[in-house]
Image (cartoon, rainbow, N blue to C red):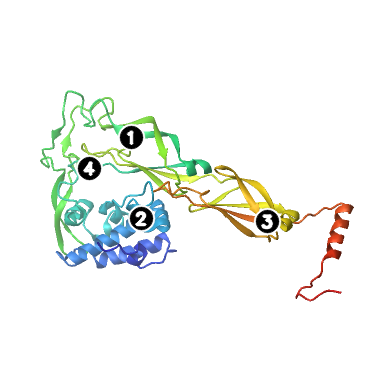
Amino acid sequence: MPSKRDYYDILGVSKNATDDELKKSYRRLAKEYHPDVKPGDKDVEAKFKELSEAYAILSDPQKKAAYDQYGHAAFDGGMGGGGFTTDFDINDIFRSAFGDGFGGFASDDILGNIFGGIFGGGQKRRSGPRRGSDSHVNIQIEFEEAVFGCEKDLKLNAVEYCEACKGTGAKPGTAAENCKKCGGSGQERVQQQNYFGGMSIGYTTCSACRGEGKIIKEPCTACRGNGKVHRNKTLSVSVPKGIDSGQAIRITGKGNPGENGGGYGDLLITVYLKPHKYFTRKGQNIYARIPINIVQASLGDEMTVDTLYGGEKLVIKPGTQPGTVVTLRGKGVPNVRNERVVGDMVITLDVAVPTQLTEKQKDLLRQFADLSKEKKGGFGKQRK
């Protein structure tokens, strides 16, 4: 299967493009590759879908940030424990770029009818069951919790199907009836002039049932006919070992409820790490700076250093220079996909030069200097 093209290349913009530049480029290209230009041309339809998908991602700040960091892996489960979805509604994309009038294009339902073969829409798209949208939340965890994994209780104000009416919106014991005006399809057949001067025949939202296809005569009192209710709940979340800041955990079926009996979307939990007092992290490696004195650097030493896994013996070789790097293998972060693969701890040794010396210490250093065979200048010449 061919790899996807870069979204920025598709829209012909740079990675630093502003929202206005993105919109301007999409509007221009969407007009050029609109299926009305060449009805029935599959290449044009595919190009239009590609443009709309790229704009859907780059015009959404959260999805754009994920794409900039992870590329297409952010939307195909390649982020390690989670990701985003590339599902989008062509009507919403067009409305954001062209406004409610779509700049002369067909209305939203007509557009959905025209592009039914491209985007999975269709004449009865509104009245059929539709999966709920994904919901997004952020959590902040401790540095160590990201390394070793943890369980977190997440408090949510969730939207769920009403238990009383099972999401139908109708009073228990009653049922919604098919709309007589649209025959239950949720849409009316209309004819409208498109952007290119031609006529598009399609379907628009039924004015009687507002696209639902059903009429509720006796609404459920628990949800007031909405079929959904808000409920505070606590969800236990397993944070995997090795997760990094900005990565997301996907909880299937814990997002928003769908429409007309459609399933729930997913819950995407983006994780952010609190900074550590001593350690920093890059990928699977942990970095730290440890000070040693000039005696330890000159004569060598053994010392115990703190790691995320407890104390670890560190051997300092005689003649150690400032900035020397020592690596402790396997003392870093587990791979989020395979916890048996663990990174390293990388230690930089900082030689601390004393700023306050006693007279005895100064005298000893002078004796050391006198005993040295050479006192070198800036270019290695012996100083007299």
Q: How far apart are marks 4 and 1 (CA)?
A: 15 Å
Q: Which residue is drawn at 67% across and 57% down?
A: 317
Where in the figure is residue 214, as x and y percent of width and height?
Answer: 16, 36
**Residue count near mark 4 (Cα–Cα under 10 Å), binned few <14, some 14–19, many ≥20:** some
Q: Residue at x 41, y 66 (%)?
A: 14
Q: How far apart are marks 2 and 1 (CA)?
A: 29 Å
Q: Which of marks 4 and 2 is nearer the N terminus?
A: 2
Q: Distance between the residues labelled 3 and 2?
A: 39 Å
Q: CB atoms at circles 2 and 1 under 8 Å apart?
A: no
Q: In which quarter of the image is the C terminus?
A: bottom right
Q: What element carries label 3?
A: strand
> Which residue position holds label 2?
73
> Which residue position holds label 3?
350
Where in the figure is residue 340, as x and y percent of width and height?
Answer: 43, 47
Q: Which mark is residue 118?
A: none
> Which residue position holds label 1?
159
In the picture, measured across the screen, residue 39 lies left or right of residue 252, that is left
Q: Earlier in the sequence, mark 2 or mark 1?
A: 2
Number of numbered callouts drawn: 4
Where in the figure is residue 196, as x and y percent of width and height?
Answer: 20, 66
Amino acid bearing label 4: Arg
Q: Residue 130 carries which label?
A: 4
**Residue count near mark 3 (Cα–Cα under 10 Å), binned few <14, some 14–19, many ≥20:** some
In the picture, measured across the screen, residue 297 lies left or right of residue 223, that is right
The residue closer to the viewer here, 90 or 57, is 57
Where in the figure is residue 377, as x and y percent of width and height?
Answer: 79, 73
Amino acid bearing label 2: Ala
Q: CB atoms at circles 3 and 2 under 8 Å apart?
A: no
In the picture, measured across the screen, residue 268 lies left or right of residue 275, that is left
